[in-house]
Amino acid sequence: MSEVAVESPRSAENYLTARRGVMSWLFTLDHKRIGVMYLASILAFFLLGGVFALMVRTELIAPGRTIMGRDMYNHMFTLHGAVMVFLFIIPGIPAALGNFVLPIMLGAKDVAFPRLNLASLYMFWGGAVFFVVVLITGGLETGWTFYTPYSTTTGQSSVVAAVVGAFILGFSSIFTAVNFIATVHTMRPAAMGWFKMPLFVWALYATAIIQLLATPVLGITLLLLALERLFGIGFFDPSLNGDPVLFQHFFWFYSHPAVYIMILPGMGITSEIISVFSRKHIFGYRFIAYSSIAIALFGFLVWGHHMFVSGQTRLASMIFSALTFSVSIPSAIKVFNWLSTLYKGSISLETPMCYGLMFIFLFGIGGLTGLFLGSLSTDVHLTDTYFIVAHFHYTMMGSTAIAFIAGIHYWWPKITGKMYSDAWGKFTALLLFVGFNHTFFPQFVSGSRGMPRRYYDYEKLLPAHPDFHGGHWLSSLGSYLVAAAFIMMAGYLLVSIVAGRPAPRNPYGGAGLEWQTSSPPPVENFTTPPVVGDPYDYSKLRFDPRSNDYVRVA
């Protein structure tokens, strides 16, 4: 293992101000600057995907045509899903926050392969360009899953561009995964054993394993789809002696592990936040660490529960159903350990903690409703209804995106060197919590009563189900509350950059190595080698009112 960061003439330079200019950022090898550029890019695509979502919800606020026609509606919900999944949720936490804090949490100067790290960012931008081309050339209407044979027979030429974009984005994920695995293995200081690593690092490590093993499957599948569309080679189209169900097997063999690419880093962030703001050592550290690896392994075994109605054998469905229930065990271990950490803790309800508690609540709903979908008897009824939409969003938006927001607030002082308004942060968290549940909880009710998803108009369903209109109205109203919350959040975070008070070294009293360096960190992360210890031992930290900071005591 390499030595920890040593002092050099450039060690004390601030990474935000050193070597100013656009070109210095575009060609930087500093993991922090790369993380910030990832963060800005990902937030831009989050904004784009959110606009598409608002257009979809506005169209569905009332039966009949509201603001767009059928074809435009298909484009909107397809692009919303594709942008959110491929350009926001999957790369969000690992590529942006992970890139920034992983080396610092390990006491290292940088990631193992800085040039590969920069290449992964360029690959991300390159893949994103193809999705921009799709927007310019008329959109995409296949759904974000690119299901065949529709994606190979529809007249939309944009399918190939979108598939190529997703293919390139897959390489970006693979590069990041290789870098993180190598960094964890080779860049830790000698005093940091495996069980002295922060749980966020464990989560990123497990995520990298999934990215490395699962993403090539998606890449090959999308390549086959493009070849079939361009040259008429019969892989998936029945008219060419292909098998469309084979595409589903390939796609979900990647995409269900990809659910854990999304959620595992969020679980790691929650572990950090719950411990810090409870002022307690994390309960069951080893169980949480091992459960991350267990989730990574189980994630490869349950893809068939997406295909209970696709014609697979009863035996296969029974096996996948049993495996689906088993994957909930390591997730439940994390939840109960977080609750045990909270028990009798000295809880401080600052903004990151509000989002951490929100994550536990919303993930609990998403996980529990997943049990209905893992059961054969109920999944057949609920498949392709709004129950699926609600479950997916509670798991992805309500859990992964909320954890991403929690991580931004938690490390914002470290990234920018500025403090945001905690009062505005807590108010916005409350508004987002209300708006999110207002949007998606009614969809559980509508879905259980048979409201199909992906429908442009539900007017003809109303005579038998008049409550469908009420459910859509509530969901659309909630989506506007969510939008208002995000606008407020962007406002106070941007204001903090300009007018926020300077952030102390350790504003929240964390015991990890990232809180032993300045805010923002110097170019080489540390001016002196950090003191390696238990990342959840708060006994050596005391609050100093003179500096408004937590300091270490002997």
Image: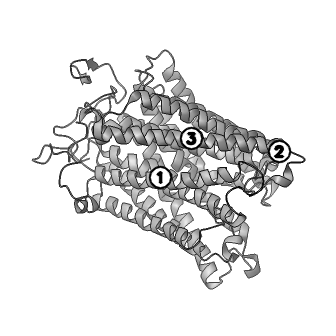
Position of the C terminus, as image quadrant, is top left
- Tell me whether the residue at label 1 lies in contact with that at label 3, contact meaning CB atoms closer than 8 angstroms: no
Q: Could you say which is closer to the camera, residue 515 or residue 415?
A: 415
Q: Secondary structure at mark 1?
A: helix
In three-dimensional space, the C-alpha distance between marks 2 and 1, rounded to whole angstroms, equals 33 Å
Indicate the position of residue 197 as horizontal and vertical percent values. Answer: 36, 37
Question: Where is residue 335, by image quadrant?
Answer: top right
- First in sequence: mark 2 vs mark 3: 2
Q: Secondary structure at mark 3?
A: helix
Query: Which label lies toward us, 1 or 3?
Result: 3
In three-dimensional space, the C-alpha distance between marks 1 and 3, rounded to whole angstroms, equals 33 Å
**Which residue is found at the position 59% from the left and 31% from the top?**
361
Q: Amino acid at mark 2?
A: Ser
Q: Name the residue that disc number 2 marks.
A: 377
Query: Which label lies toward us, 2 or 1?
Result: 2
Q: Amino acid at mark 1?
A: Ile
Q: Name the residue that disc number 3 marks.
A: 482
Residue 193 in view here: no
**Which residue is found at the position 21% from the left and 58% from the top?**
21
Indicate the position of residue 39 as horizontal and vertical percent values. Answer: 39, 50
**Of the numbered discs in the image, which one, if any, rests on residue 209?**
1
Q: Residues within 10 Å of mark 3 (few under 14, many from 20)?
A: many
